């Protein structure tokens, strides 16, 4: 019996030792693989592939804008409506672009392992590249058709018609800026002035390019397509700048008209907060008291800004209302929260619109990258949600998120 037990132990102990060492080795390998998968190299590789996806998304976004311009040009050439094939290409490209930006936003916010982030980025890159190739093929086919069926002279004439229409609709940008300059500080109308200058410059450049294109139509040895395409881009840029100018002008005048009522509403909110403070426990009352004092100081600053910097004043009031609501927390009833949201909503919406408009102008001037465009899209989406929400509390929350996203953009 003893010999049998000894034989069993003599076989079992080495086997257990071997299997134990193997298990430890396997566990060590698994740990090392997992550690490497989340290590600095993996993170850097995932970040590089995410950056590549962002670059391709920006290229796709710009190409969709070019396609939109081409659809507009085709509409002018064909008597008001672009060819169905070109419109379908644009719709498909826009849909794909929007989907990919949403996926990219999720990748930006993801806490998944680097390998999963890298794979998601690669999928975005591949799909963006396929869409870009499809758009470029559609544009080549359309350009060939235009060359075969529409003369350069017709294209130049159509572009000149749009140029004159644009110049008429723009009016005198300098007069709009001069009106703002006489009433407000430069910080308030800086975006408007930049948009006005850009609009005039783009119009003048488009006119020069069309002159060049027209001259080339009389010379068989030269092609008018290059300057004509450049003129179309300048026309589109002029339209965007004119729209931004009108938006800046409108927002500033609206802020000037609304700032006094926003100040009155903020005073009322502070008085109501003081009343609420009286019913709180000492610690909570002290915290709310500090927030009220900050709000009073912020309101005093807003009053000083109101006459010459109404947008800044409305923005400051919206932010102090945000902080005051946060300090009030659960101290208010549902009815009080609803009433407070209803009173804060107009000013916060105005501040959000101004922040989004400023972000749009900034990203356009700087030709922003994918992350800025994603944040701007989020701001635009939240602003739209705030405008559509029936519940004042939901609308107010969405407007505040729009402000934060616009600042990030």
Image (tube, grey):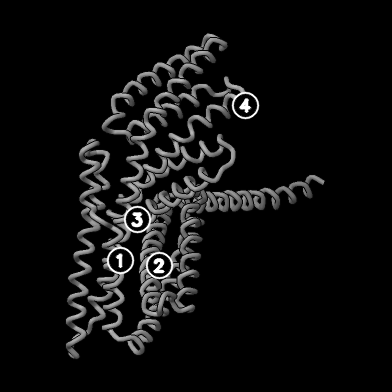
Residue at 34% x, 31% y is 313
Can you identify the residue that label 1 sits on? 165
Camera sees residue 41: no
Q: CB of mark 1 within 8 Å of CB of mark 4?
A: no
Q: CB of mark 1 within 8 Å of CB of mark 3?
A: no
Give left or right: position of 362 versus 288: left
Q: Badge 4: few (under 14), some or many (20 or more) residues near its Cα, within 10 Å?
A: few
Can you identify the residue that label 3 sits on? 369
Q: Can you say whether 160 is above or below 335 in the image?
A: below
Dot placed on the residue nearer the N-terminal end, 2 or 3: 2
Q: How far apart are marks 1 and 4 (CA)?
A: 53 Å
Residue at 46% x, 19% y is 270
Residue at 37% x, 75% y is 76
Q: Position of residue 131 (x, y in %)?
A: 45, 71
Mark nearer the viewer, 1 or 3: 1
> SS at mark 1?
helix
> SS at mark 2?
helix
Dot placed on the residue nearer the N-terminal end, 4 or 2: 2
Can you identify the residue that label 2 sits on? 64
> SS at mark 4?
helix
Can you identify the residue that label 4 sits on? 334
Q: Quadrant of residue 208?
A: bottom left
Mark nearer the viewer, 4 or 3: 4
Q: How far apart are marks 2 and 1 (CA)?
A: 24 Å
Dot placed on the residue nearer the N-terminal end, 1 or 4: 1
Q: Can you say whether 139 is above or below 271 in the image?
A: below
């Amino acid at each position: 019996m003893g010999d049998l037990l000894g034989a069993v132990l003599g076989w079992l102990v080495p086997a257990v030792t071997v299997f134990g060492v193997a298990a430890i080795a396997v566990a060590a390998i698994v740990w090392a693989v997992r550690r490497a998968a989340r290590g600095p190299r993996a993170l850097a590789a995932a970040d590089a592939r995410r950056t590549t996806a962002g670059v391709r998304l920006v290229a796709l976004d710009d190409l969709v804008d070019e396609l939109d311009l081409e659809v507009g040009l085709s509409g002018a050439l064909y008597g008001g409506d672009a060819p169905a094939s070109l419109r379908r290409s644009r719709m498909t490209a826009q849909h794909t672009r929007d989907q990919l930006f949403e996926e990219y936003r999720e990748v930006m916010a993801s806490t998944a392992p680097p390998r999963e982030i890298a794979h998601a980025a690669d999928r975005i890159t591949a799909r963006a590249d396929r869409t870009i190739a499809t758009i470029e093929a559609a544009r080549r086919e359309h350009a060939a058709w235009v060359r075969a069926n529409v003369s350069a002279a017709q294209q130049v004439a159509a572009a000149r018609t749009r140029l004159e229409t644009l110049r008429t609709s723009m009016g005198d940008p300098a007069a709009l800026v001069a009106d703002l300059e006489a009433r407000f500080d430069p910080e308030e109308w800086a975006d408007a002035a930049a948009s006005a200058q850009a609009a005039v410059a783009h119009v003048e450049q488009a006119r020069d390019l069309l002159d060049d294109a027209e001259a080339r139509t009389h010379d068989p040895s030269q092609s008018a397509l290059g300057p004509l395409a450049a003129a179309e881009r300048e026309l589109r840029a002029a339209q965007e700048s004119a729209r931004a100018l009108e938006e800046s002008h409108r927002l500033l005048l609206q802020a000037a008209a609304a700032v006094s009522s926003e100040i009155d509403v903020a005073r009322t909110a502070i008085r109501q907060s003081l009343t609420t403070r009286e019913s709180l426990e000492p610690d909570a009352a002290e915290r709310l008291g500090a927030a009220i004092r900050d709000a009073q100081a912020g309101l005093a600053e807003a009053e000083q800004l109101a006459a010459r910097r109404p947008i800044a004043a409305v923005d400051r009031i919206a932010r102090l209302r945000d902080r005051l609501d946060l300090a009030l927390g659960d101290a208010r009833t549902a009815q009080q929260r609803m009433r407070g949201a209803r009173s804060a909503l107009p000013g916060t919406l105005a501040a959000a619109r101004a922040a989004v408009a400023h972000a749009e102008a900034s990203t356009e001037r700087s030709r922003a990258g994918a992350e800025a465009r994603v944040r701007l899209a989020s701001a635009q989406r939240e602003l739209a949600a705030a405008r559509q929400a029936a519940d004042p509390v939901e609308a107010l929350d969405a407007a505040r998120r729009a402000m934060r996203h616009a600042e990030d953009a």
